């Protein structure tokens, strides 16, 4: 159970009662303990204890509604920008100077809300050229695999069928590994 303090600062909430979930039905939450969230404020985890509700009931919903930016660490921003725009077809949202060493480059997959940044935070250079944990989705993996391979994108092998769908692993110009997946293949 999480409550973001910045979302409810205009209200005086002393406790939260969660209804509708059989595992927490009638459970009361109090005494929130703060959890730092990357210097952007605090996330509060409420501690549960049994008891009767005292006061107004507050409905708690999902406060995170999408991923805004995913960072991809790169060694050569110009080479990476060319790869993501020319080979993958992403569009440039922002490309501006950030400091003496790097630019802030933000890209978007056409028709998608999530953005990608091609930027390496100082001290994170060891992340370049590793498995990112990022999975891109496409409608037809065989067609996408053929098109991207034709553009010179390096794949570990052809798409593989699994019970959950079809996937292939590829690398960007910096050696970062990604999953390309589809529910059909």
Image (spheres, rainbow, N blue to C red):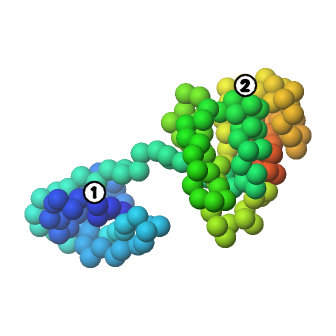
Q: Residues within 10 Å of mark 2 (few under 14, many from 20)?
A: some
As helix, strand or loop, the secondary structure at mark 2 comes to loop
Counting labels gives 2
Q: Nearer the viewer, residue 143 or 153?
A: 153
- Chain-order first, disc 2 or disc 1: 1
The residue located at (51%, 36%) in the rendering is: 113
> Is 153 drawn above or below residue 120 in the view shown?
above
Q: Nearer the viewer, residue 116 or 177?
A: 116
Q: Nearer the viewer, residue 105 or 6?
A: 105
Q: Nearer the viewer, residue 117 or 179?
A: 117
In the figure, is residue 156 to the left or right of 89?
right
Separation of residues labelled 2 and 1 (CA atoms): 40 Å
> Is 32 drawn above or below residue 8 in the view shown?
below
The residue located at (41%, 50%) in the rendering is: 64
The mark found on residue 116 in the picture is none
Q: Identify residue for label 2.
A: 140
């Amino acid at each position: 159970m999480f409550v973001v303090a910045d979302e409810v600062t205009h209200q005086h909430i002393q406790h939260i009662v969660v209804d509708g979930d059989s595992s927490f039905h009638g459970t009361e939450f109090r005494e929130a303990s703060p959890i730092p969230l990357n210097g952007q404020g605090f996330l509060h985890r409420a501690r549960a204890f049994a008891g009767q509700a005292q006061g107004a009931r507050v409905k708690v919903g999902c406060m995170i509604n999408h991923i805004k930016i995913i960072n991809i660490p790169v060694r050569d921003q110009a080479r990476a920008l060319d790869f993501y725009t020319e080979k993958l077809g992403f569009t440039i949202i922002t490309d501006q100077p950030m400091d003496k060493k790097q630019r802030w480059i933000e890209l978007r997959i056409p028709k998608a809300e999530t953005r990608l940044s091609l930027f390496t935070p100082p001290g994170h250079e060891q992340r370049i050229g590793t498995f990112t944990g990022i999975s891109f989705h496409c409608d037809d993996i065989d067609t996408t695999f053929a098109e991207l391979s034709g553009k010179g994108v390096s794949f570990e092998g052809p798409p593989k069928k699994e019970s959950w769908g079809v996937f292939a692993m590829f690398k960007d110009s910096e050696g970062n590994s990604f999953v390309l997946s589809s529910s059909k293949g």
